[in-house]
Structure formats: structure tokens, C-alpha cells
Image (spheres, helix red, strand yellow):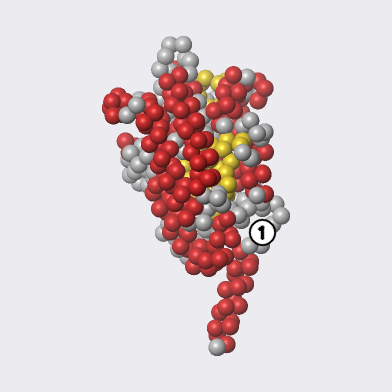
């Protein structure tokens, strides 16, 4: 009897301690899902993947000055989001997968995988990647772990205050844009609809596992990446690819409105990534940028004919470039974007921004 009381007291102590976090910490945890834009090293643990950033000159401006698996010269959007909500960057899930003694998911975890997409087939040409569906599968195991540690009621209280971030879809669109086979099988609208239906089903799965607060950014103008600009002599944006982004963004906004009707307790912030990036590209000086077309790191036309690898060259002033490599933004660009996501105006973040979402 005494041992039972001691055990229950210890469990209650652990449960209470898990909810005590500093005033600077705005949410108890952040769970991140997505692609290379928010991958903090998961692909480093996938030996059969060639979609990796564990080599120079990636990480040249990261605090350690070493490559970390981030597809960036420094920090990426996942890092800046964590800073904004007062948390350390959520660790890559794959780094904890086989380390049961040291792992803790109480402050969140990052499942994002470079080259992955909403659809399972996206990224397979680059070897093993973790598509969104599999990332949610992994989260289901994390949910089981939290249930064991906090109990059913404790886990739900913890998760309903946590932030769930899903940043993915660009790779799906670029795959469609460059595939004649996919064009034959699906119209652009059919393909985008397939993406949105898949995303919706995964959000609903997360909801069943306790998620209530979501950050769901729309897609950037993917046709303005250096890899797309070099496809035409004028080095202009690929409007076909950009048109796919517009279709997807219109679809996800409609889907989220419908989802709110279906799941009363869900709350979300949609971020208009497309408009903000277009603003930066069209008026770079207003945001502190000078170069909007060329990648900082790479070789050839616009530094985009060969990607950022150790034999590439890189620009001396990374802070004035919008793009780090053939598709990924620089640390400076991500900082501007996340600042807007966090407490931006209604024309970019709706129905509420992240700061307001946290307060709900």
C-alpha cells in the first residue's frame, strides 16, 4: 500500500513538473513535420538517402560553423520558430529513434525530411526519404510515449497547448512540374486536389492524437527558385510552377475552413508564404536584400546548374541573398519570413497569427 502511494506521488510529481515551463516558453512543445525547409538533420540518419546536407558549405553561418543536415547556410525556419516560442530547436526524430534511454519528447520533436512531400512517391528518386504519412506514423509512437509518461489526461493537456507545424508541398509541385508522365495521368487541378486530400487526412490523424493548434503555411512561388529560373534565357520565374503554388494555396485555404467546421476544437494559422516571398523578390532592398535570382552557393548560370556541394563557390555576403542554393532560402530570408509568421498582419496570417494562436 505504501509503495503504491509512493509510486502515485512520484507520478504526480513528474506530471506536474512537465507543465512547469519558463515565462519565456510560450508553448510546452513544438512538433515539426515537413521537408528540407525545416529538416534539422533527420536525413543524416537515412544511409540510403542522397537528399542530405551533411557537408560544406551548408552550416557555414550556423553557430558551430559546421554542416548539421540543414539545407541552409545557417539556421532554418524550424530554428527561428522555436526561438520565437521560447523553446530549443526540436531535435530530429531519427536521432532519438534508437536512443530510448536519453530521449524525451516533452518539448517536442522534428520529423521533417529533405526531398519529402505530402505524397508518398515524392522524393523517391533520391533514395529513402520520410513522406508526411510516415512522419505522422512516427508521431503516433511519440504520442504513445507521452501517454505512458503523462497519462491520458496529462498528455491531452500538454498537447492541446503545443504547436504543430507542417511545412511541405513544394517538392510535390516541382515533381509534377518536371514530369511529363504525371501530366498525362493528372491535370494540375487533380494533382493539387490529391495533395490537399492527403494533407487533410494527415491533419485529422494528428487531431486524433491530441493536436489542436496548427501552423500551416501555404507554398512559396516555387517557380522563382534559381533552379527554375535557369530553364529560360531571360532568367524569369517559371510561371507554370508558380501557377501550381497558387492552385494549391487556394485549395488549402478552402480545406482549412472546411476542417474547422468538422473539428470544432481545431485552431490554425495559415501563412501566405507566396505573397511575402513575392514582396521580397519584387522589392528586395526594402527587406535588406540585393540578389533575388542567383543562389549564393553553387556553380554555373545563377549558381544553379550545379548545387551547393564542397567544390562549389559561395557568396561572401549571405545576408543579402534571398536564396542559399538552387531551391532553399538563406538564413536571412527565413528570419524575415518567421518574423512575419509570428506576429504578422491579417493580410498575411489568417485567421490569426502564431502569437494569437498560442493565446487561444
- Residue 79 in view, yes or no: no
Please determine whether, in this image, residue 229 is positioned above or below residue 186: above
Which residue is located at x 28 percent, y 25 percent? 184
In the current view of this chain or complex, which residue is farthest to the top?
A: 234
Element on which disc 1 rests: loop
Residue 260: give x, y in percent of width and height. Answer: 54, 45
Observer-nearest of 34 and 350: 350
In the current view of this chain or complex, which residue is farthest to the bottom?
A: 1
Please determine whether, in this image, residue 117 is positioned above or below residue 15: above
Residue designated by label 1 = 21
Which residue is located at x 55 percent, y 83 percent? 4
Observer-nearest of 64 and 220: 220
Mark 1: give few (<14), some (14-19) or many (20+) Cα within 10 Å: some
Which residue is located at x 50 percent, y 65 percent? 147
Residue 91: give x, y in percent of width and height. Answer: 52, 51
Observer-nearest of 249 and 46: 249
- Residue 271 in view, yes or no: yes
Which residue is located at x 66 percent, y 59 percent? 21
In the current view of this chain or complex, which residue is farthest to the front?
A: 261
Would you say 197 lies left or right of 19 here? left
Would you say 346 lies left or right of 41 here? right
Q: Quadrant of residue 344?
A: top right
Residue 86: give x, y in percent of width and height. Answer: 65, 49
Q: Quadrant of residue 197?
A: top left
What is the number of callouts on the image? 1
Please determine whether, in this image, residue 218 is positioned above or below residue 82: above
Quadrant into which the N terminus falls: bottom right
Would you say 163 lies left or right of 41 here? right
Residue 168: give x, y in percent of width and height. Answer: 46, 38
Amino acid at each position: 500500500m505504501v509503495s503504491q502511494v509512493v509510486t502515485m506521488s512520484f507520478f504526480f510529481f513528474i506530471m506536474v513538473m512537465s507543465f512547469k515551463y519558463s515565462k519565456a516558453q510560450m508553448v510546452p512543445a513544438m512538433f515539426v513535420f515537413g521537408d528540407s525547409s525545416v529538416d534539422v538533420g533527420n536525413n543524416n540518419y537515412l544511409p540510403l538517402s542522397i537528399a542530405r546536407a551533411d557537408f560544406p558549405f551548408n552550416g557555414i553561418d550556423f553557430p558551430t560553423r559546421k554542416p548539421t543536415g540543414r539545407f541552409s547556410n545557417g539556421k532554418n525556419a524550424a530554428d527561428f520558430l522555436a526561438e520565437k516560442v521560447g523553446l530549443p530547436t526540436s531535435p530530429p526524430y531519427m536521432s532519438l529513434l534508437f536512443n530510448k534511454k536519453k530521449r524525451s519528447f516533452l518539448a517536442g520533436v522534428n520529423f521533417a525530411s529533405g526531398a519529402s512531400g505530402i505524397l508518398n512517391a515524392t522524393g523517391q528518386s533520391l533514395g529513402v526519404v520520410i513522406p508526411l504519412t510516415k512522419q505522422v506514423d512516427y508521431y503516433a509512437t511519440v504520442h504513445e510515449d507521452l501517454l505512458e509518461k503523462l497519462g491520458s489526461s496529462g498528455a491531452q493537456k500538454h498537447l492541446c497547448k503545443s504547436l504543430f507545424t507542417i511545412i511541405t508541398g513544394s517538392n510535390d509541385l516541382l515533381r509534377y512540374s518536371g514530369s511529363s508522365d504525371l501530366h498525362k495521368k493528372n491535370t494540375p487541378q487533380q494533382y493539387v486536389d490529391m495533395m490537399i486530400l492527403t494533407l487533410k487526412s494527415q491533419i485529422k490523424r494528428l487531431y486524433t492524437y491530441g493536436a489542436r493548434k496548427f501552423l500551416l503555411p501555404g507554398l512559396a512561388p516555387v517557380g522563382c527558385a534559381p533552379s527554375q529560373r535557369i530553364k529560360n534565357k531571360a532568367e524569369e520565374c517559371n510561371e507554370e510552377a508558380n501557377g501550381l503554388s497558387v492552385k494549391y494555396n487556394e485549395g488549402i485555404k478552402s480545406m482549412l475552413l472546411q476542417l474547422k467546421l468538422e473539428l470544432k476544437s481545431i485552431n490554425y494559422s495559415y501563412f501566405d508564404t507566396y505573397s511575402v516571398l513575392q514582396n521580397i523578390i519584387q522589392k528586395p532592398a526594402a527587406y535588406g536584400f540585393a540578389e533575388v535570382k542567383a543562389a549564393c552557393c553553387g556553380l554555373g548560370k545563377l549558381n544553379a546548374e550545379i548545387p551547393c556541394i564542397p567544390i562549389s563557390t559561395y557568396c561572401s555576403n549571405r545576408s543579402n541573398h534571398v536564396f542559399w542554393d538552387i531551391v532553399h532560402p538563406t538564413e536571412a530570408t527565413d528570419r524575415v519570413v518567421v518574423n512575419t509568421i509570428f506576429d504578422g498582419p491579417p493580410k498575411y496570417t489568417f485567421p490569426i497569427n502564431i502569437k494569437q494562436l498560442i493565446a487561444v
